[in-house]
Image (cartoon, helix red, strand yellow):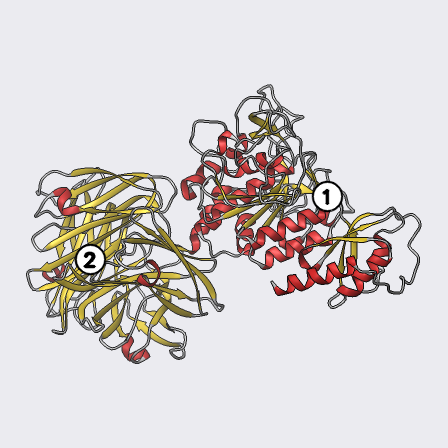
Amino acid sequence: MKTRVLFGLLLAAFLLSGFISPGIAAAPPPDESGGKFILHPEEGKLADVVAEIVVQGASVQKALPQGNLLVEAPEGIGETSLSRLPGVSWAEPDIPFYAQTTPNDPDYARQWYLERINMPQAWDTASGGNPSVEIAVLDSGAAYRDNGSFTKAPDFGGTIFVTGHDFIENDDYPDDDYGHGTHMAAIIASTFGNVFRGAGMAYGCSIMPVKVLGSNGVGSASQLASGITWAADNGAKIISMSVASPRHSEAVGQAVAYAASKGVLCIAAAGNEGSDAGYPGGMDCPADEGDAVLAVGATDYRNERAHYSNYGSGLDLVAPGGDMTRDDNHDGYGDGICQESYIQSGNSQAGYTLAWADGTSMAAPQVAAVAGLILSLNPALTPAQTSQIITSTCSDIGSAGWDGYYGAGLLNAAAAVAAVGQHSWYFAEGTTRAGFEEWLCVLNPDAQDVQVAFDFLMSGGETKNAVFTVAAQSRFSLNVRSVVGDEKDVAAVVSSGNSIVAERPMYFNYQGKWAGGSDAKGTRRPSTDWYFAEGTTRAGFEEWLTLANPSYQDAGATIQYLVGAGQGFNRVQECVIPARSRITVNVNMAIGPELDVSLYINSSLPIVAERPMYFNYHDKWAGGADVIGALSPSVEWYFAEGTTRAGFEEWLTLANPGSQDATAHIDYLLGAGQGTNQQQDWQIPAHSRVTVNVNMAVGPEVDVSLHVTSSKPIVAERPMYFDYHGRAQGGHDVMGAPQAGNNWYFAEGTTRAGFEEWLTLANPGDVDAIVDVYYLLAAGQGSNSTKAYVIPAHSRITVSVNQDVGQDVDVSLHITSNWPIVAERPLYFSYGSQTWKGGTCQVGYQPGVD
C-alpha cells in the first residue's frame, strides 16, 4: 500500500510540475502518429521516464499493473521514439482486442457440442463443479443483475456470480452492453436442469465477470492486462479469454505471466484468421503466451478444423467452435454454438434469446469449464497439472499425436475429469463427537514435496477446506477436529496433484461404554454401486452405514439388506443423500435384531459408502471396526493376516449378491513351519451370505492367510476378535484384496508408546518371493530405511515394524516384491492418556486396483 501511495505522489508531482530535463537523443520519426501507448520503465528509472514523457509533450494517463504506464502521445511521437527514451525497457501501442465472433440468433436449442466432448459423462463424475472455483470471464461483462437498463439473463437464475470489475467504465459493475460476454459466461455456467434454454457446463462453479470490451466488442491491451491482473489478485482460479489481437502485447504477456505465478490458469482463444505464419506459433495474443496459457482452436460439426481457426506450433488443443456457414447436421440452420445472449448484439434492452455463434471464442470457455470441474475435484492442482490433465486426455483427431491443426486433440471432458481421481481419496465416515478422535494420515511416496487438499463434507451441507504440504517420501497426520471443530459428523476428500495414499484412523469410547479404534483406507473414486459382506445386529452389536455424496446434486440410494441363509427375508430401504453432505443409517433399526446381514447399495449418482460397527463381543471384548465397501464383486479375494492363536477368533464372511448360487473355494495358507495348508468349499445361496469359522477350519495356534476363489462373483470380508496378550481387547475387519500384486502402500502406522505394529505378507504363488519393505518416517523423525525379506511359496510371514524402525516414530510403508504377494498391517494399541485399548487392520493399497 505504501508503495502505491508513493508512486501516485511521485507521478502526480511530475504531471503537475514544470520539471524540465534534456531531450531525447534522437528526433522522433516524422511518420509516428501519436495515440495511446504502454511503456515499461526500467527498475529505478520511473522518475526519469516520467520527466522525459512530459518534456516530449506526452502525458501519463495512469499507472498499470507490473509497473507499466499508459501514455497519451501527440502526433509525431510513437512507439519507436518512446521505446528510445532513456530508462524505458519497451514501449508498444495500446492495441485493440476484439471479441472473436458476432452472435446469430435462430430461436432453437441444440447443444450438439456437449456430446462431441463427452460432457454428459463428465457430469456423472463431477456434477457441475464447486462454487469455491471462481472462473473469471474477461469479455464484455455479463448480464448478471437487474439495474437500470440492464436486466439479468433469465438462464442465470441459478448461476453463482462473485464480485467482478469493469475496466471500461472503471467501476465494480461489469454490466454487458454488447452480449458477447454473456454468451461466454452462459457456455460455462448457465443454470442446469431448469427446463429452460441451454445447459451450462460447470454450472456449480462461480463466475467472475471482468469487463475489458466495450459496447462495440473492442477493448485495449491496457484494459485486458489490468483485467487479468485484477482477476488473479481477487480469487480467480481460471481466466477465460475469448478476445484476441493479431499483434503481440508485452503488457498482456506480463499480466498472463503474473497470473500464472499466482497459480491461475489462463485459457485463450487461438484467433479466427485461419492463422498467419507471422504470429508467434500461429496464435493471436494472448493465446501466444506459450506455457503460461492454454491456446484453444476450434472444430466444426464434422470434428474437423473450422476454416477460421488459427493453427500452428502454439496450439494446445481444440474444442467445438462451430461454423455458421455450414449445415452438416441438416437441420436448416448454421452449425453454431448456442447459449443465451441478447436478441440484438449491442442492445442490452432488446431481450434475450438462445443465440448462435461460431469462432474460437466459443471453444475457449468450454475448456475453462472443464478446468473448473477438474479443480472442483482436486483444488490442489497447479495450472501446469490442470493443463496436463486436459491435454493428455484429449481425443486424438487429425494426424496421430500432436499436430499443428488440432494440437493435442479434441477436448474430452469425461476423460479429463476421470483422470483427476488418480490422486484423490474419499471417506464417508468420520466424527468429532465427544469420545471420538479422528485423524487423516497421508503418505507422499514421491521425491518432491506435495500440496494436499482436505475437503470436509458435513451433515447439513456445511463444508470446510484446508491445504497442507507433505514432505517428500514422508507422511503427514492431520487431526480432523483442528479443521472442522467439535461435534461434527464428517466425510472427507483428500486430493493432491501428485500420487498420495490416505488412511483414516479413529479412536473412541463409543457412547461411554465400548472403547477401541478403527482404520479405513480411502477409496479412489465414488461409485453408484457398493458392496459389503460383513454385518450383524446380534446382541452386543450396533451396525451403521454412512453414505457421502461429494457431488452438487442430491443422490437417491437404494440399500438392499441380504440376510444370512435361513434367517428370513431380505429388506430394501430408500434414502436421499443431499448434495455435498453425508447421512448415517442405523442398520439395527432398518432390519431388526439378531440377523447377519450383507449390503448392496445402488445410487443415482456416484457416492461413497462405509460401514462402522461397534460391539461387545460375547460380553468380553469391546471395540469397533470400520470398512469402506467394495466397488464390485470378484471371483478372487486375498487376505494376508489371520491367526487362531490363543485370544483370537477369526471369521470369514462371504456375500453373494447375484441371482445364482455360488461355490467358493478357500485355500488356507499357514505360516512357515506351522503345518500343512488346508482347503475348504462353501455353497453361497443367491442373494445371501455365509459365515465361516476359521478357527474351526484350521485348528488352534496357527497364523493363516486366505485365498478365496468362487464360481460366481462374490464379496469377502474377514472380521477378527481378540484379547491381544491380555493388553488390548477388541476387533478389526478388512475387505479382501481382489488380486495379489508387486506394489503395496500403507499411509498409517506408528510405534509410539502403547502401539505395536505388524506387517503380514502372504505369498499365494508357486515360487518364493523376495520382498523389500521401505519405511517412510514422518518429517523430522529420522532417516527412512529398508528391510529385505523372503516369503516361501504358498506361505506367509509376520514382520515386527517396532523392531525394524525402533520406538516412537510415525511410519508409512511401501512394499515391493519380485512376485505377486498380499500385504496387511495389523496394529494393536493403548491410545493416549485415555488408554483406549484395541486394534485395527488394513489391507494395503495397490496402484491401479480399485
| Location of mark 2 (residue) | 718
Quadrant housing residue 102: top right
Residue 223's disc number: none
Q: Is label 2 in a helix, a strand or a loop?
A: strand
Q: Which of 736 and 556 is in front in this view?
A: 556
Q: Is residue 161 visible?
A: yes
Tell me, yes or no, whether the two marked residues, 1 and 2, touch with CB atoms within 8 Å. no
Report x, y in % for residue 329. Answer: 58, 24
Report x, y in % for residue 739. Answer: 32, 56
Q: Which of marks 1 and 2 is in front?
A: 1
Instruction: Name the kind of residue labelled 1 in the image.
Output: Ser
Report x, y in % for residue 610. Answer: 26, 51
Q: Nearer the viewer, residue 508 or 724?
A: 508
Q: Can residue 313 be seen in this view?
A: no
Of the 4 image quadrants, the one containing the N terminus is bottom right
Quadrant housing residue 592: top left
Report x, y in % for residue 743. Answer: 38, 63
The residue lying at 87 percent from left, 56 percent from top is 56
The residue lying at 30 percent from left, 54 percent from top is 490
| Location of mark 1 (residue) | 245
Q: Is label 1 in a helix, a strand or a loop?
A: loop
> Dot 1: few (<14), some (14–19), or many (≥20) neighbours within 10 Å?
many
- With respect to residue 696, does 812 lie above or below? below
Instruction: Name the kind of residue labelled 2 in the image.
Output: Arg
